[in-house]
Image (tube, rainbow, N blue to C red):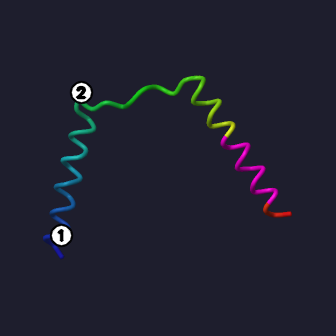
Amino acid sequence: MNNLKDSLESDIEERIKFIESDSYDLGPPINKKDIIGMLIVGIISFIGLVWGAI
């Protein structure tokens, strides 16, 4: 059990170092098209939820 915990802790430390490094790419920023797409999907999902509750 202790070996598993040590393995997890070392893996977490490696991932934290990678994320904090300068070579880590956060991906492209969210733009206007992304927001419009999220709103459309949210509205369609809400309509489906309401329609299913009727």
Q: Label 1 near label 2: C-beta < 8 Å?
A: no
Residue located beneath label 2 in the image: 22
Q: Secondary structure at mark 2?
A: loop
Quadrant of res 39: top right
First in sequence: mark 2 or mark 1?
1
Near-viewer residue (7 or 49): 49
Dividing the picture into quarters, in which one does residue 36 lie?
top right
Q: What amino acid type should be assigned to the residue bearing mark 1?
A: Leu
Residue 39: say if magenta: no
Magenta range: 41-51
Q: Is residue 42 above or below residue 51?
A: above
The percent position of residue 25, horizontal first and vertical second, equals: 31, 30
Left or right: residue 36 versus residue 25 is: right
The dot on residue 4 is 1
Residue 26 as seen in the image, left or right of residue 44 = left
Task: Pick the quarter of the image with the N terminus.
Answer: bottom left
Place of residue 10 in the rendered image (x, y in percent of width and height, measured from the top left): 16, 55
Between 11 and 39, the residue placed more toward the observer is 39
Instruction: Specify few, some or many for label 1: CA neighbours under 10 Å numbering under 14, 14-19, or 20 or more.
Output: few
Residue drawn at x 70%, y 50% is: 45
Instruction: Give the residue furthest to the right.
Output: 54
Q: What residue is at 82 percent from the left and 57 percent from the top? A: 51
How many numbered callouts?
A: 2
- Left or right, 29 with reference to 49: left
For the C terminus, the quadrant is bottom right
Kind of residue at badge 2 = Asp
Q: Residues within 10 Å of mark 2 (few under 14, many from 20)?
A: few
Quadrant for residue 17, please give it: top left
